[in-house]
Amino acid sequence: MHTKAAIIAAEALVRDGIRSMLSADCTVKVVGETANFADIPQVRRRVDPDLFIIDASGLRAGSEAHARQIRSLVDMADRPLVLLAEEGVQSDMEVLRLGVCVLQRSRMSSADLVSSVRLLAAGYLPVERHLAQQLAHRALEERAGVAAHIRLLTPREREVFHLLARGKSNMEIATSLTLAKSTVKTHVQGILKKLGLASRLEVVMLAHRQVRPPVRSTMLRQRARARTAA
């Protein structure tokens, strides 16, 4: 069973280099390539690759704009990605949180690239050790920050807070907690004041910093199962 890969790189020399590195492994087959990011959807429809290998080294690393560009590539590809990118810790964290990207550096060896492609095709997401550690530390810091805010609330306010975070109306909260609607309104106002928030929407946003939605790594598992069943 071959892993079908498509290569996206502006420079022909880079595309040739990636193809040459992959040729050392008979299980990986290059089925398409292009020099332009804008052609990614067309390549996906034409050759249906299992994954893309994209040279993103020309993008400015470490900026919010860089993270947005990577998210755009993920959306266009709708496939797992091996990204060849220069190091930029902040944007690396955002890329990893997308859950479908493997980061490789320009100093990678053929074995590094082939290993990443194999693991990604099998449904795994290999991460450099130091990035995994930083991602774990960042998640712990964010959760600790939200927990510190919630400790400002009384037990009853915490109950209201969690229901607000689920998008419940004052009437629904009142019914759930057996409270008067006016009492719920008072609790909501107290929560907003203690947490320094301006609206119910900001309560939802704060709560979801504590429990992030699952990353898109389900895409990896689904495609791996599809390849096995084919």
Image (spheres, grey):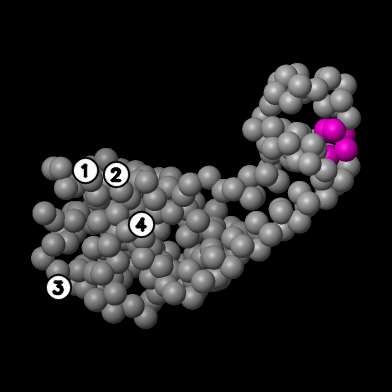
Amino acid at the residue labelled 4 = Leu
Q: Position of residue 182 (x, y in %)?
A: 87, 21
**Mark 2 = which residue?**
222
Label 1: which secondary element: helix
Residue 138 versus residue 95: which sits nearer the camera? 138
- Circles 1 and 2: CB distance less than 8 Å? yes
Mark 3 or 4, nearer chain start: 3
Label 4: which secondary element: strand
| 2 vs 4, front mark | 2
C-alpha gap between disc 1 and disc 2: 6 Å
Amino acid at the residue labelled 2 = Gln
Number of other residues with Cα within 10 Å of mark 4, as a class: few under 14, some 14 to 19, many 20 or more: many
C-alpha gap between disc 3 and disc 4: 20 Å
- Circles 2 and 4: CB distance less than 8 Å? no
**Mark 3 = which residue?**
24
Residue 134 versus residue 50: which sits nearer the camera? 134
Q: Is residue 62 visible?
A: no
Q: Look at the image and say whether residue 98 sits in the magenta stretch.
A: no
C-alpha gap between disc 1 and disc 4: 17 Å
Tell me what residue is drawn at x 19 percent, y 47 percent: 227
Please determine whether, in this image, residue 120 is positioned above or below residue 203: below
Mark 3 or 1, nearer chain start: 3
Image: magenta residue range: 187-192
| 3 vs 1, front mark | 1
Q: Looking at the figure, which quarter contains the C terminus?
A: top left
Q: Position of residue 228 (x, y in %)?
A: 16, 47
**Mark 1 = which residue?**
226
